[in-house]
Structures are given as C-alpha cells and as structure tokens.
Image: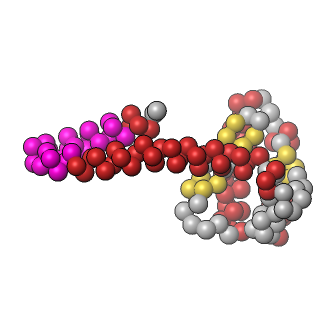
Amino acid sequence: MVWSCISWYGVGYIVDVGKNMDKNVYLSVLQDDLVKSMTGYCEENDLIMADFEFMQDNDPKHKSKIVSERLSKQDFTTMEWPPQFSDLNPIENMWNTLKNACLNSMIVLLPLWMNYGLVRSRLGTKLPKKNVKIILKLCLNDVLTL
C-alpha cells in the first residue's frame, strides 16, 4: 500500500507503507511524510504551513482520536469533508492516473521480462552473469524512461 499527497504545487512524497494502514501507521505517515511534503512546498514556493488546508476523506483511521488530536496541533488547518464524497476527492484522480501509468508500464515490462528468460536460455553460458545483469538493467532503464 502506498500513501501520497497532492497540492497546487505538485505531488508530495509517495510512501510505501508496506502493509495495511491503521491509525498508528497513518499517524506516522502524517508526522513524517506529510510534514516533509508540506515543508518542501513551503521552501520551494516561499510559503508557510498556515497557507495550507489539509483534506482527507472520512476513512475511520483518518477520523480516529489520535489522528484528530495530532492534526489539531499542526500549523495548517484540516478541511471537513462530507462522508461518501470520495469521488470528488482530487487525490482519487491522481491514484487513477498512477494506476493507469503502472498498468501501461506492466504491459511493456511483462514481454521484456518474458523475453529476457528466452534470450538468456539461448545464450546459455556464453555471457558472464555480470554482463547479463547489465544488459537487463539497461533494457529496464530504457523502458522506464518511455
């Protein structure tokens, strides 16, 4: 599972949470990664934290007491968001765009990965493993920069 934020100034850190997010993991992400993202926005655009209004949906972990208390102590405000309006949440559009980009990358990477096995089996021991790894890395870098 990943977490990120967006603002008028761009996409914040994208964090690999690595597991299901509960209120404690979410709190940690807010304390570390949201604050880092907002600090970056502030430094790059001559802003202060009070210039921001944080928006989140009504997921139970977002509304937990521990998270609400922490957010109330921040220099930015937290926007109230009505329940069951996640389709209007701007970050949902970002996640959709990201998922489509990942899907498109997989469409390109899967045949490459399958061909790598075929090419390697044809080469057998003709190339040292180090060279094969370098070739694969170069191929992947080319695909990822498309």
Residue at horizontal 66 percent and vertical 49 percent from the top = 95
Q: Quadrant of residue 16?
A: bottom right
Instruction: Between residue 120 and residue 22, name the one nearer to us.
Output: 120
Instruction: Check the image and report above or below for 142 versus 65.
Output: above
Q: Quadrant of residue 141?
A: top left
Is 28 positioned to the left or the right of 52 in the image? left
Q: Quadrant of residue 26?
A: bottom right
Is 14 positioned to the left or the right of 62 in the image? left
Q: Position of residue 74 (x, y in %)?
A: 82, 52
| Prevailing SS of the magenta stretch | helix
Q: Is residue 75 visible?
A: no
- Indicate yes or no whether the magenta region holds residue 129: yes
- Indicate yes or no whether the magenta region holds residue 104: no
Residue at horizontal 9 percent and vertical 43 percent from the top = 126
Residue furthest left in the image? 126
Q: Quadrant of the N terminus?
A: bottom right
Instruction: Check the image and report above or below for 26 versus 123.
Output: below
Residue at horizontal 71 percent and vertical 68 percent from the top = 23
Q: Position of residue 98 (x, y in %)?
A: 60, 46
Q: Is residue 9 visible?
A: yes
Is 80 positioned to the left or the right of 113 in the image? right
Residue at horizontal 58 percent and vertical 46 percent from the top = 100
Q: Position of residue 127 (x, y in %)?
A: 13, 42
Q: Position of residue 76 (x, y in %)?
A: 84, 47
Q: Which residues are magenta?
A: 119-140
